[in-house]
């Protein structure tokens, strides 16, 4: 039942979806990278709980794609986030109008619904461990409710990281 609720929340969040932009070094052969680990001193700007969620989800998704976590990795993964809080963009519109002849008068307004949201920009860096150089970067922008439950946060991060990792490795043109 828990899995079903996470899948439902994930589908809802994916439909609202984060946007992902990717940049990478075009000279790098990404097929050579098979092992990874996280950068030793990640300072993400998030809570330790969110850091742990992101690492667990990233581990799971990378291992599904054949990567191996290793103490002597080819890739180091770093991530950090910038957040801001704003009112929900969802509003309930109310209008009053009247008209007759060739004259019309109307008054309308919007009432915010859904509470405040966290606008988040999550950046994920893949760094070549041998030369300590950034080779691939993804920036995802999304939003979640300010008072999200742990399950909602997990579903949000799963959807965002899955969307990010669909862009790796870059497609050859």
Image: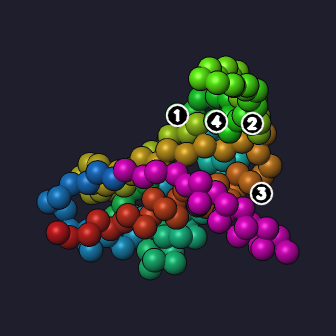
Q: Alpha carbon of mark 1 to alpha carbon of mark 4: how far?
A: 19 Å
- Which is more N-terminal, label 4 or label 1? 1
CB atoms at circles 3 and 4 under 8 Å apart? no
| Nearer the camera: disc 2 or disc 1 | 2
| Nearer the camera: disc 3 or disc 2 | 2
Residue under the point 64% across and 28% down: 86
Q: Alpha carbon of mark 1 to alpha carbon of mark 3: how far?
A: 21 Å
The percent position of residue 69, horizontal first and vertical second, equals 49, 69
Q: Residues within 10 Å of mark 3 (few under 14, many from 20)?
A: some
CB atoms at circles 2 and 4 under 8 Å apart? no
- Which is more N-terminal, label 3 or label 1? 1
Circle on res. 151: 3
Q: Alpha carbon of mark 3 to alpha carbon of mark 4: how far?
A: 23 Å
- Which is more N-terminal, label 4 or label 3? 4
Instruction: Give the labeled residue for mark 4.
Output: 89
Q: Residues within 10 Å of mark 2 (few under 14, many from 20)?
A: few
For this view, does 39 lie left or right of residue 91?
Answer: left
On the image, which quarter does residue 123 sit in? Answer: top left
Q: Residues within 10 Å of mark 4 (few under 14, many from 20)?
A: few
Q: Secondary structure at mark 2?
A: strand
The percent position of residue 98, horizontal first and vertical second, equals 73, 25
Which range is magenta?
1-21
Compared to residue 22, the image places residue 74 above or below, namely below
- Which is more N-terminal, label 1 or label 2? 1
Compared to residue 145, the image places residue 31 above or below, namely below
């Amino acid at each position: 039942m828990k899995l079903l609720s996470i899948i439902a929340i994930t589908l809802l969040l994916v439909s609202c979806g984060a946007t992902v932009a990717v940049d990478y070094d075009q000279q790098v052969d990404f097929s050579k990278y098979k092992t990874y680990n996280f950068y030793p001193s990640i300072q993400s700007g998030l809570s330790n709980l969110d850091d742990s969620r992101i690492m667990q989800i990233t581990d799971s998704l990378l291992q599904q794609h054949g990567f191996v976590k290793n103490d002597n990795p080819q890739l180091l993964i770093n991530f950090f986030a910038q957040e801001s809080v704003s009112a929900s963009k969802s509003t309930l519109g109310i209008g009053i109008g009247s008209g007759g002849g060739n004259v019309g008068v109307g008054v309308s307004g919007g009432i915010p619904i859904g509470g405040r949201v966290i606008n988040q920009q999550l950046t994920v860096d893949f760094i070549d461990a041998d030369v300590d150089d950034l080779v691939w970067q993804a920036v995802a922008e999304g939003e979640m409710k300010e008072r999200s439950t742990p399950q909602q946060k997990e579903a949000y991060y799963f959807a965002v990281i899955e969307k990010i990792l669909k862009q790796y490795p870059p497609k050859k043109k």
